[in-house]
Image: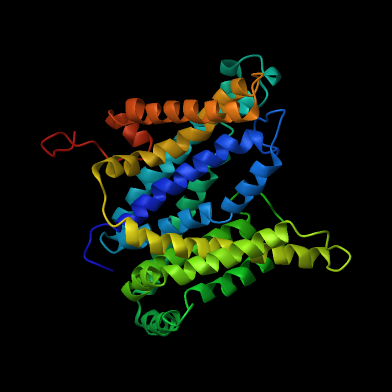
Amino acid sequence: MSERNRVYELDWLRVLLIFAVFMHHVLMPFNGDDWHIMNTESSKFLDDIMVYFEQFRLPSLFFIAGAGSYLLLSKVAAKKFLKDKFFRLLIPFVVGMVLIVPPQTYFEDPNAFDSFWQAFPAMAFRFEPNHLWFIEFLVVFSLLALPLFKLTQSDFFDKSFRRFESFSMRPLGLFSWVFSLIALRVLLKWFIDDDGHSVTNLSLSLFYLWFFVSGMWMIKSSKIWAKLLSHRKPHLICLVVSTLLFYGYYYSPDLSPYLSLNMRWAIWWMVCSLVAWSALLTLLGYGQKYFYSRPRWLKLTNELIYPFYIFHQTVIVVIGYFVIQLSWPLSLKAVLLLCSTFTVTAGLCLLLVYPFNWMRYLFGLKKKRDSGGAIT
């Protein structure tokens, strides 16, 4: 990789993707799915849009996490890496389960409890990850990153990787990685029928691990990273074609008379994988083209995006519980929920977490430096 201390396009993409997660959860009460809280009126059109972005939003975040792990391991010893992940992932994960998740459980059905404070101890020590399952996966993947990084430094891996790198330099060589992703996704779904978000659900965890490992491998190679930039237009074309295939199948008529259920699901996971991979390649290519610097506001945003993620869904559920009871049109409720929850979540990060080192410690941020550069 280059001599830069950070790959700035990854900072940009991390912020944009977490905001996309936030937008997804803001709209969940209105898309007709069975979420924590649901509006009486729903929009099928909204659901049709949201299902598309679901295919690449989280896979891209796991890719970025893998790339970040490789970059950090390239600079620090294994012990320091583990210490960093303990303080920045594990502690916020536990704090989130104990303090942040319980209000969601309560506001799903307040009538089921005498009061929040009476029910809080039982809910807190249930250690329910809820939306924090993403952090649970990162904790496990970070542990796996150590042996994976060590493997990438071996002579045996280096020789094999050079051949792999050479193959990836061919036209659409990087896009061809998708065939291994399709095979993995279809086989996992065939043999492990589990839709849960636990890390023990291998049909999900191994799928996301594929993106995490891909991030480690691609950031290792300056040639591969450069090709992402130079081939951004062909990858965009792949994304357009993949999108057409995705929605072509999504809106296709009933195929049950012609295809078995397993085959129909296999095609679905195939088109989903095509969108996931082509979208990621496109984001990485155009990210290098346009997101090559880091303005001051992005530095702060990139720092606070982690506690923002931890807080956001609880804020959405709590405020949304009251918003969906209003006799307003769906669109106005969605706008109100978006504006109010963004303001409250950002306010919690800026006013409650950012200024205080003890709060920064609980939510995975490094100690704040004073104006002279010293750690306070």
The residue lying toward the viewer, choosing from 29 and 121, is 29
- The percent position of residue 106, horizontal first and vertical second, equals 62, 24
The residue lying toward the viewer, choosing from 240 and 30, is 240
Q: Residue at x 26, y 59 (%)?
A: 76
- The percent position of residue 8, horizontal first and vertical second, equals 30, 55
Q: Quadrant of the N terminus?
A: bottom left
Q: Quadrant of the C terminus?
A: top left
Q: Residue at x 36, y 50 (%)?
A: 12
Q: Residue at x 14, y 38 (%)?
A: 374
Q: Residue furthest right?
A: 257
- The percent position of residue 113, horizontal first and vertical second, equals 67, 18
Residue 370 in the figure: left or right of residue 265: left
The residue lying toward the viewer, choosing from 7 and 94, is 7
Q: Residue furthest left?
A: 372
Is any part of residue 320 visible from this angle?
A: yes
Snapshot quadrant of residue 107: top right
Q: Residue at x 28, y 31 (%)?
A: 357
Residue 90 in the figure: left or right of residue 288: right
Residue 112 in the figure: left or right of residue 302: right
Is any part of residue 128 visible from this angle?
A: no
| Count of picture labels | 0
Residue 10 in the figure: left or right of residue 194: left
- The percent position of residue 80, horizontal first and vertical second, equals 29, 54
Instruction: Please say if 375 is above or below 291.
Output: above
